[in-house]
Image (cartoon, helix red, strand yellow):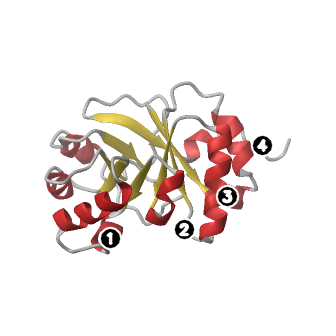
Amino acid sequence: MIYALADKETLNQKGVSLKTFLQHISTFPNIPILQYRNKLASLEEKKEDLEIIREYYDGILIINDNIELISYADGLHLGQEDLRKYSYDLQEAVSLVRQKIGARLLGLSTHDKEEILEANTLDLDYIGLGAYRATDTKSEANVGGKTLLEAAKYSKHPVGIIGGVHMDDIFEEPIVYKVIGSGLYKGLFPTKGK
């Protein structure tokens, strides 16, 4: 299954509106989940974007980091550092987040076997695992390659593999989501020189 990544900063850099992106991905089969990520905008702009997503996308909507916008989404995804802002005790941190989001989905970014084993002890709905391959959009990411595929086998949670993932990649459980961002842009931009 495809876990679509709608990164507003990337869309802005490419000159593509959120609405155009959503209309474009509606032509893809099997995108049951979409994460909205926007590190720079105001809460008001993010709220407006979430309302646009709801208008054009009817799958599961995950918000990245902004727990204060959880009422507009079906779940929350946090990075390792973002979770630790609640508490360095990860059990306590997840408990505090769960108090705010209730039964909504909760995902956590992981990068290696050690973080996966730690995540196994937490009340999560899924984990993100990456970076699988190098990407243009996250040049600072450490690439795990096949080592990540082995590490994923230790997860008791469903895994979303991220980082240079292609639509035609095939993975074994517990990897259930192919997290794709820029791979969904194909056909969205005019080709240069034509």
Query: Which of pointers 1 and 4 indicates the residue nearer the eye?
Result: 1
Q: Earlier in the sequence, mark 2 or mark 4?
A: 2
The quarter in which the N terminus is drawn is: top left
Estimate the x, y position of residue 20 in percent, counting from the top left.
Answer: 74, 43
**Residue linked to disc 4:** 191
Q: What whole-number distance in Å separates the C-alpha atoms at marks 1 and 4?
A: 38 Å
Mark 1 closeness class: few <14, some 14–19, many ≥20 residues within 10 Å? few
Q: Decide: marks 4, 3 in contact (CB < 8 A)?
A: no
Camera-nearest residue between 62 and 185: 62
Q: Which element carries disc 1, helix, strand or loop? A: helix
Q: Give the label, 2 or 4, closer to the camera.
A: 2
Distance Cα–Cα, label 2 vs label 1: 14 Å
User: Which residue lies at the image location 66% right of the left edge and 65% below the top edge?
Assistant: 45
**Amino acid type, residue under disc 3 in the picture:** Glu
**What x and y, as percent, mark residue 84?**
28, 71
Q: Quadrant of the C terminus?
A: top right
Residue with the mark numbered 1: 81
C-alpha separation, residue under disc 3 versus residue under disc 1 = 26 Å
Q: Amino acid at mark 4?
A: Thr
Q: Is residue 36 visible?
A: yes
In the rendered structure, are the residues bearing label 3 and label 1 in contact, judged by CB atoms less than 8 Å apart? Answer: no
Secondary structure under badge 3? helix
Counting residues from the start of the chain, the first of labels 3 and 1 encountered is 3
Residue 158 sits in which quadrant? Answer: top left
Disc 2 marks which residue? 39
Q: Are marks 2 and 1 in contact (CB under 8 Å)?
A: no
Q: Pointer 3: what residue?
A: 48
Residue 98 picture quarter: bottom left
The residues bearing labels 3 and 2 have C-alpha atoms spaced at a distance of 15 Å
Q: Earlier in the sequence, mark 4 or mark 3?
A: 3
